[in-house]
């Protein structure tokens, strides 16, 4: 059973109004000149000035548009290309994937109770040679995936390829983003758009 009305996918044009979801970090990205595109119902920051130079050290990207489903109970893992399974506890798990994979993942959830929490969480990617350094300057979490204190607030860290995803409540997203960008800038890095990332975040 799922609460589909919470899903961004359920939004539809009505009376000339075209709903588009925005990340909690959108304003900060506009302030630094980000270019946005509408993708799968979200306004996504696809490019940011200076991102090529930033990636040589460490890039910070907002991938909050990823589909996120919370399953209760966690049950058997849902796996596959482009699907990230994160068991929060024996009773709860998060499944993250690129938006185009969302419908097939929901089908695979089957009868398990699920909530679309896409808009409830911000997801910040930390990538590049100095990704470890930035993360270590934000948290004492030393094994992944795991939850705990990140920049003095509660969140989760998942290891993704050569970098990390930091997941936090959307109302804390802007703050955690600013901390991550600040730590990255000290190393010659900074904000990047999603199109600068390798892998399935589009």
Image (cartoon, rainbow, N blue to C red):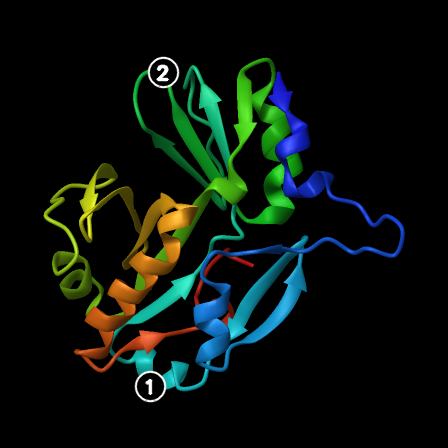
Furthest toward the right, the residue is 15
Quadrant of the drawing holding the N terminus: top right
Q: Secondary structure at mark 2?
A: loop
Question: Looking at the picture, how far across and down is residue 154, in whole percent?
Answer: 25, 41
Few, some or many residues within 10 Å of mark 1 (<14, 14–19, 20+): some
- The answer to which quarter of the image holds residue 164 is bottom left
Question: Looking at the picture, how far across and down is residue 127, in whole percent?
Answer: 31, 65
Q: Confirm whether residue 118 shows in the render.
A: yes
Tag 2 or tag 1, which sits nearer the N-term?
Answer: 1
- The answer to which quarter of the image holds residue 43 is bottom right
What residue sits right under mark 1 in the picture? 53
Q: Confirm whether residue 193 shows in the render.
A: no
- The disc placed on residue 91 is 2
Judging depth in this view, the residue of 112 and 80 nearest the camera is 112
51 lies above or below 130: below
Left or right of 142? Residue 174 is right
Left or right of 100? Residue 53 is left
- The disc placed on residue 90 is none
Real-space Cα separation, disc 1 to disc 2, in angstroms: 43 Å
Quadrant of the drawing holding the C terminus: bottom right
* Proximity of marks 1 and 2: CB atoms separated by less than 8 Å: no
Question: Looking at the picture, how far across and down is residue 81, in whole percent?
Answer: 49, 44
Please give the name of the residue rendered at 18% of the width and 49% of the height, measured from the top-left corner.
152
Please give the name of the residue rendered at 61% of the width and 39% of the height, measured from the top-left corner.
102
Left or right of 44? Residue 53 is left
Please give the name of the residue rendered at 17% of the width and 61% of the height, measured from the top-left corner.
132
161 lies above or below 112: below
22 lies above or below 67: below
Question: Looking at the picture, how far across and down is residue 158, in whole percent?
Answer: 30, 45
């Amino acid at each position: 059973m799922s609460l589909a009305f919470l899903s961004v996918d359920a939004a539809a044009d009505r009376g000339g109004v075209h709903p588009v979801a925005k990340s909690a970090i959108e304003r900060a990205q506009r302030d630094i000149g980000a270019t946005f595109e509408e993708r799968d119902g979200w306004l996504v920051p696809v490019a940011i000035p200076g991102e090529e130079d930033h990636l040589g050290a460490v890039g910070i990207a907002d991938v909050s548009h990823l589909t996120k489903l919370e399953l209760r109970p966690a049950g058997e893992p849902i796996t596959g290309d482009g699907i990230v399974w994160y068991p929060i506890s024996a009773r709860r798990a998060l499944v993250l994937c690129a938006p185009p994979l969302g419908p097939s993942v929901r089908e695979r959830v089957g009868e398990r109770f699920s909530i679309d929490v896409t808009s409830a969480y911000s997801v910040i990617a930390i990538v590049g040679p100095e990704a470890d350094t930035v993360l270590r300057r934000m948290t004492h979490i030393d094994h992944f995936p795991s939850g705990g204190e990140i920049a003095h607030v509660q969140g989760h860290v998942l290891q993704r390829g050569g970098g990390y995803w930091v997941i936090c409540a959307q109302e804390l997203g802007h703050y955690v983003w600013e901390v991550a960008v600040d730590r990255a800038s000290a190393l010659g890095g900074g904000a990047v758009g999603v199109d600068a990332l390798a892998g399935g975040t589009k």
